Image (tube, coloured by chain):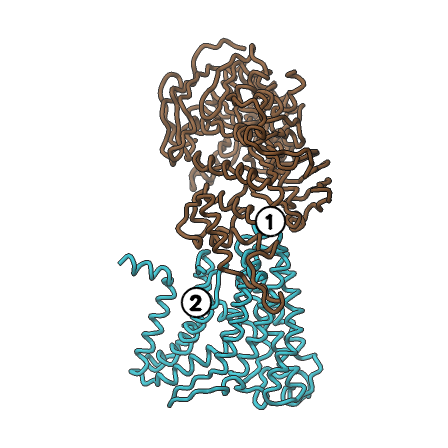
Amino acid sequence: MSEMTNTLLEMQNVSKEYNGNPVLKDVNFTLKEGEVLGLVGENGAGKSTLMNILFGMDVIQQTGGYGGKVLIDGKEVKFASPLDALKAGIGMVHQEFSLLPGFTAAENILLNREPENKSVLSLVFGDRANTIDRKELQKEAIAAITKLGVELDPDMLVSEMPVGHKQFTEISREISKSAIRLLVLDEPTAVLTEKEADMLLKAIKNLANQGIAVIFITHRLQEILDVCNKVIVMRDGRIIRELDAASTSIPEMAKLMVGREVSTDKPKAESDGRTISDKIVLSVKNLWVDMPGETVRDVNIEVRDGEILGIGGLAGQGKLGIPNGIMGLFPAGGKVVLNGSEIPLNNPRACLDSSLAFVSEDRRGVGLLLDESLEWNIAFPAMQIQNKFLKNYLGGLIKWRDQDAIREVTQKYINQLQIKCTSSLQKAKELSGGNQQKICLAKAFALEPKLLFVSEPTRGIDIGAKALVLQALREYNKKHGVTIVMISSELEELRQICDRIAIITDGSVSGILPAERPSEEFGILMVGKSKKEAM
Amino acid sequence: MDKAMELVKSFGLPRLIITLFLLALFVIAPFAGINVASSVTDVLGRFGQNAIMVLAMVPMIHSGCGLNFGLPLGIISGLLGATLAIETGIQGPVSFLLAILYSTPFALIFGWGYGKLLNRVKGSEMMIATYVGFSSVAFMSIMWLILPYHSPTMVWGYTGQGLRTTISTEGFYYHILRDTLNLRIGNLSISFGEIIFFALFAFIIWAFLHTKTGTAMTAVGSNPVFARASGINIDKQRTLSVIMSTWLGALGILCYQQGYGFVQLYQGPMYMAMPAVSAILIGGASVNKANITNVIIGTILYQGIVSMTPSVMNSLIHTDMSEVLRIIVSNGMILYALTRKTGASR
């Protein structure tokens, strides 16, 4: 490392809230020139919000700005837009690429900042008629690539590149901006092969040696150890600990990441008087699911009668693909056996007929008829699948909607789940997120399933509603003995209500543990690949 | 004031303007020397003729296939039924029943194919539907010449083969519904036959939408992913809705012919979809929501404007404005509705 002298970036007491929900509290850290800072934390820990503040993203201003100070070179800055941040020398590479596929690497690197030649037409039409100086463009692009220290053909079309090269192009673009002093990389290795990732890590070190500071966000803890000088672990909007990368370990980081200890050491079922038999209700063998962004490769799992099984893991590892695949919403293969009989995959109707129910993580897209009344939303699946809430005429030839029965059942669930609405005829889109989630639960409850999949039931709803939703699930399990499989990105939430928790990494189960086990063990399972190295 | 605004909002501004315009026309009419009673008769007559074709929009809107711009396909089924019925030579009321009977298999087959096609182009149904309508009209223009019809009332007199462009329904089912249960008071004449005939099918559609299958169809239109996750076969529901719409289109044109007095072949069905689409939109429907009330109000308003403006305008300013106004109203309304996704509420 080169001499680390000047403090480049400093954050003082930075805080941020969305609609009264604090998402960042008292964030303090400093970053020196040429330093590589690792930023780790679970999904929703506040990493993205912090970077959005640093980068002056619109979403921050639109939701009421932030508290505290951001200092660059010891002077306070308030970026009104990402352009200001760019001018101050901050570059960011996002998880999603923003490249033009039909253009070459060089063209993409210098897009909209191309070196220009004056032409005759420029005299008449001004600078817009300048031509591009191809030679200079090539030279500058190569300079940026060399600075990064990777192998990349400047003439290759982006559409023909492997993912890794796209990532390099993206980073080269940021560092080709002459004033670049701080580079933020948001999970740059998530899409790369191991070899490409190694190259990238080398490139990061290279940049640091040239005095560019790097903030490196990743879930792969080994990479942090490999490349960073120091590590910040975030959880629930706070910086939990600032660690020296040289003296920490993967288990330590994992433990800090997933957080607080839960005091119960007795199994849940004993403490609240439920019975979980050893009978297997659902067994899943070699399941694969082709769900974009949540690919499931090979999942084997067994669910016991009456339990609440949690499925956790980091985003994109495939935990959401499991229920979506079993319920036939995405192409899937493998073997799923419910109570001894095999369930055909890729057939939503067959799953529902065999008394499975699913509360989707995509509330607005899959879970609700937004333009219809609450009555329709709650009664619809039960009506279609089990012929409930219907009156039969002409010997069953005409199946008439029984409006009274529908109203009755809706009212029942509105009372039971304390759904806030003006009437059972209100449209689903007019409710708040938490109440919409309760409608989704009511819809599934109305099916009276034997086994219920609940996917991300607390995503995007406030803390009060979260507690109510979890409470409703727990009571439903206790009262009716319904087996529940709950998928959530929040480990703490799973540990609160589940009996066992399976952690999914890279499309398969990396381990199943009782919920009482210390969070550190789950943390290690989550970072998956590094498990062996860590032990 | 707020309440008044609310009322205007729920009724819809364009609907309000058109209603006021129509009322104004009726107020002006006596001063322009036009008999109000015969105007009302005219509007009701046109309502009876056109309402079922407007009703043919409803099933497809409910299943999320959008507005049925492919109505000409249904109309062609109706035309096949009509010509086949006349070909038999059986006269009187039976010919109307025969026409319905003969057109039904065509409507089912065409509707099935049309539905399959629309299932492959989800998201751009309305554009595809428009061209399904246009191309089927072109194809049938050839077929009307080739098909081996022989009835002297229908074929060209000089060659003895190929169907004429317009065929009179006189002697077959001319005014078969119009003259049933006809109430006459002075110049005013109300045909309850047509109204009851429409009411019957409106009731069937209304009732269908209250059944299990009808509910599933509406859910498919409202949120197809939700419907699929609830175990509904989306494509099946959509195909069913298209078949229903096509059959209602066939029925609609037969109803139109009995009032109008002629079977119009060749280019006749070409632009028949526009007035029907426009009418249901004026009635307050949107691309994905429609009900029977929209059909009734829309048809009365649209046909009212179309029949009243020419007579009133012509006698006031002595120029023929009718066609211009009709085109502005119908196309303008379609344009307006397509730019707005919200609309009627159930």
Q: Are marks 1 and 2 in contact (CB under 8 Å)?
A: no
Which quadrant would the C terminus of chain B be assigned to in this image? bottom left
- Percent x, y for residue B257? 55, 81
- Percent x, y for residue A312? 59, 31
Which element carries disc 1, helix, strand or loop?
Answer: helix
Depth check, front residue: A409 or A259 = A409
Bin the neighbour count of mark 1 within 10 Å (Cα to Cα): few under 14, some 14-19, many 20 and up.
many
Depth check, front residue: A141 or A48 = A48
Depth check, front residue: A418 or A158 = A418
Which element carries disc 2, helix, strand or loop?
Answer: loop
Rendered shade, chain A: brown
B144 up-or-down from A379: above or below: below
Query: Is A234 on the left-hand or right-hand side of B187?
Result: right
Q: Which residue is mark 2?
A: B283
Tell which chain the image draws in cyan: B
- Percent x, y for residue B201? 54, 73
Q: Which residue is mark 1?
A: B229
